[in-house]
């Protein structure tokens, strides 16, 4: 390789590595949170609310914190449908939220600042890179499976880009909670493959792959880069993603420079308000206003209450409501449906401030109020695939205005005149004036908190008193049980002492009787022993005489047998010498025969190898299998034949040994048996030598092959 080509290669590798650092991030690190994290899951457990269904801003867990921005998150329950995962993204001016792959739908609201959203929907958007300019008040949705990144603008007032987002993939995930997180890093998806796959897919050398693996993990939010550079990197790595995740049409990426209407965000701050009066305004954004919300579980709402105002009491019949306080502070009053008892549900009041998240379950009537000294602005998400029509309890839009007044009066237990006065007095709809209502709610909330503390303290004192009484009762019961146990032990000890005394006396009497009987038996045994000793002495003398006579006879027989064995040994040694000489001659002949056969087999093997070299690979494999099968059969046959010959030789040897040991057969029969034995041994050695010759030839052939 020349120096120029090497330099080009190094430069390209370095550029590629820098680009990957900017593109491939690891949001799984972002989802690895601190306190409240559920071990083994992708999300922490929901943070418990301090007062009612509210999560304070300081209760969020930190996902990412860098000098260029931060991400915090909450996971809340609505008490009915399940879990909801919200993230709050804050980006410094001219910062970059690195590209990620969405695991679930993402619906978000831009609170402050401006920037650019770039994304591609590989499943639905036909390989188009889409771009949307974002500004404060914009609402948008990204689908599951999208790849996206964000870049904040460098504005003159250096406002931060703040985004409130909610994630959900399905109703099942809302009920059960996700274990994979909201998004993941493309770096993890790519580098999960081994080096060989990556080389083939990316068409780069192994050194480049090693450089990719050696790179450190990037923070989720980094310093921004020029838009032209960002676009260039996106195009490069989009092709890498498509290598693993799908095929591109025409091998190109379609950069959608001209955003169509359906790609535009919906701006709440510039839109017409659904309700507006001197007390404030409200607005709901659904798929009718924003096409990308179609097939989504979420819609977005915003409420802006002026000083001393109230969003009239109402409830949602088909959805839960998740709110986020944007500006100011206020009070939220939630009423439990009348069919539930207080053990299952209690009315609640809670104060919320900027950054707090509060949840109101379905069917629960609610009212939001601002304080007299400031406005109260909050936005949020409703969770339903059906149309939601909030039901108002007061005002000119109240359901009470539709029902029969007499029936309504009867339900309250008042006269028709009284109910008529109540209904006619309501001149405003939905957003009402409510001076000092929030202050009164705050006072009642504090009184309730104080009352709950007093009730808790009284309950604690009552439980403490009950515990002391129970301990005293247990102590007295233990004392009585201990006294009863001591009395029982004394009685048992006395009874045991009396039993032991009686047993001792009985034992002494039995021992005395046993000693008397033992003495009598000892005298009888002594007399019997003396008689037995006399009889044994007499038998012993007779036995000594008998053994002496037998020993003399055995010695005579041993001398005779020794003479016979000496003669047989000399004859066997002569036969053994002759047999060894014969065996050595046969072995020499077999070795010569084996050498000759080995030379013939070597010549045949070389000829077979030359012929095998000219054959096709399939024929060679077939021949080897056939030779192996034939050799296995031949070896089995040889082994079986050798086993039969060994058994025959063993049988003849046993017959010959039996003939030798009998001593009654003639010298001619012994010589015939010896010759047969020698002949059998010779055939066996020939068979073994032949088998060794064939085995050596076959082994050499296999080695060459």
Image (spheres, helix red, strand yellow):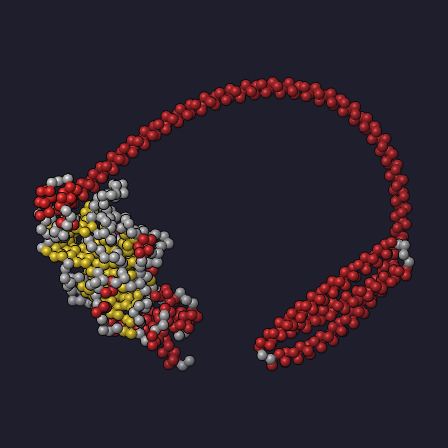
Q: Is residue 535 above or below residue 601?
A: above
- Residue 184 occupies quadrant: bottom left
Residue 151 picture location, percent across and down: 24, 67
Residue 166 vs residue 534, the one in the foreground:
166
Asked whether residue 214 appears in the rendered view, the answer is: no
Left or right of residue 646, residue 123 in this image: left
- Give the residue displayed 22% in from the left and 48% down from the top: 364
Residue 106 picture location, percent across and down: 27, 61
Q: In the picture, which quadrant includes the N terminus?
A: bottom left
- Give the residue displayed 78% in from the left and 67% down from the top: 683
Residue 295 vs residue 247, the one in the foreground:
295
- Give the residue displayed 31% in from the left and 59% down from the top: 169
- Give the residue displayed 62% in from the left and 71% down from the top: 625
Asked whether residue 144 appears in the rendered view, the answer is: yes
- Residue 93 occupies quadrant: bottom left
Residue 423 picture location, percent across and down: 11, 47
Q: Is residue 153 above or below residue 324?
A: below
Q: How many discs mark residues in the rendered view?
A: 0
Residue 230 picture location, percent across and down: 27, 71
Left or right of residue 363, residue 571 in this image: right
Q: Is residue 222 above or below residue 513?
A: below
Q: In the picture, which quadrant includes the C terminus?
A: bottom right
């Amino acid at each position: 390789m020349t120096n120029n080509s090497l330099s080009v290669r190094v430069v390209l590798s370095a550029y590629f590595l820098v680009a990957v650092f900017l593109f491939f991030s690891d949001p799984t690190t972002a989802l690895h949170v601190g306190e409240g994290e559920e071990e083994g899951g992708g999300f922490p457990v929901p943070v418990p609310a301090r007062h009612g269904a509210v999560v304070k801003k300081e209760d969020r867990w930190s996902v990412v914190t860098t000098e260029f921005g931060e991400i915090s998150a909450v996971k809340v329950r609505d008490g009915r449908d399940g879990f909801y995962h919200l993230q709050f993204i804050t980006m410094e001016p001219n910062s970059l939220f690195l590209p990620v792959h969405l695991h679930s739908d993402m619906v978000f609201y831009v609170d402050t600042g401006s920037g650019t959203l770039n994304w591609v929907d590989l499943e639905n958007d036909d390989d188009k890179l889409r771009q949307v300019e974002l500004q404060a008040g914009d609402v948008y949705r990204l689908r599951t499976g999208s790849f996206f990144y964000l870049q904040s603008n460098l504005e003159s007032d250096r406002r931060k880009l703040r985004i409130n987002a909610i994630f959900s993939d399905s109703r099942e995930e809302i009920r059960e909670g996700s274990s994979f997180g909201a998004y993941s890093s493309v770096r993890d998806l790519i580098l999960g493959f081994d080096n060989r796959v990556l080389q083939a897919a990316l068409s780069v050398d192994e050194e480049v792959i090693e450089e990719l693996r050696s790179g450190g993990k990037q923070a989720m939010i980094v310093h921004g880069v020029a838009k032209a550079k960002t676009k260039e990197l996106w195009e490069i790595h989009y092709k890498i993603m498509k290598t693993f995740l799908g095929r591109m049409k025409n091998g190109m990426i379609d950069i959608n420079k001209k955003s169509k209407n359906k790609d535009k965000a919906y701006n709440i701050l510039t839109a017409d308000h659904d309700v507006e009066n001197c007390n404030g305004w409200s607005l709901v954004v659904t798929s009718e206003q924003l096409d990308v919300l179609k097939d989504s579980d979420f819609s977005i709402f915003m409420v802006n209450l002026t000083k001393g105002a109230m969003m009239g009491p109402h409830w949602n019949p088909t959805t839960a409501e998740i709110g986020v306080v944007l500006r100011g502070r206020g009070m939220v009053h939630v009423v439990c449906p009348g069919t539930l008892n207080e053990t299952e549900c209690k009315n609640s009041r809670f104060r919320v401030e900027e950054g707090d998240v509060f949840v109101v379950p379905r069917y629960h009537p609610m009212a939001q109020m601002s304080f007299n000294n400031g406005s109260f602005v909050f936005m949020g998400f409703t969770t339903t695939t059906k149309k939601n029509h909030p039901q108002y309890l007061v005002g000119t839009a109240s359901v009470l205005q539709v029902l029969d007044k007499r029936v309504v009066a009867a339900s309250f237990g008042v006269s028709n005149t009284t109910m008529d006065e109540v209904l006619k007095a309501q001149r405003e709809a939905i957003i009402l004036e409510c001076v000092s209502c929030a202050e009164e709610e705050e006072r009642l909330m504090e009184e309730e908190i104080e009352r709950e503390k007093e009730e808790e303290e009284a309950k604690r004192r009552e439980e403490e008193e009950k515990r002391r009484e129970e301990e005293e009762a247990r102590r007295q019961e233990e004392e009585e049980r201990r006294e009863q146990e001591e009395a029982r032990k004394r009685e048992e000890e006395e009874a045991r002492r009396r039993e032991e005394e009686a047993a001792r006396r009985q034992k002494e009497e039995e021992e005395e009787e046993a000693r008397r009987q033992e003495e009598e038996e000892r005298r009888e045994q002594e007399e019997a022993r003396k008689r037995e000793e006399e009889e044994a002495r007499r038998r012993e003398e007779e036995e000594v005489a008998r053994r002496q006579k037998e020993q003399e006879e055995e010695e005579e027989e041993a001398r005779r047998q020794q003479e016979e064995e000496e003669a047989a040994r000399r004859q066997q040694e002569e036969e053994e010498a002759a047999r060894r000489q014969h065996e050595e001659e046969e072995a020499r002949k077999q070795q010569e025969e084996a050498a000759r056969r080995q030379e013939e087999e070597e010549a045949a093997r070389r000829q077979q190898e030359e012929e095998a070299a000219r054959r096709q690979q399939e024929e060679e494999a077939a021949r080897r299998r056939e030779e192996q099968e034939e050799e296995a059969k031949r070896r089995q046959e040889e082994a079986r034949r050798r086993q039969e010959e060994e058994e025959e030789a063993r049988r003849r040897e046993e017959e010959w040994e039996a003939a030798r040991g009998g001593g009654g057969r003639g010298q001619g029969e012994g010589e015939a048996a010896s010759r047969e034995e020698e002949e059998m041994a010779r055939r066996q050695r020939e068979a073994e030598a032949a088998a060794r010759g064939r085995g050596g030839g076959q082994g050499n052939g296999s080695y060459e092959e």
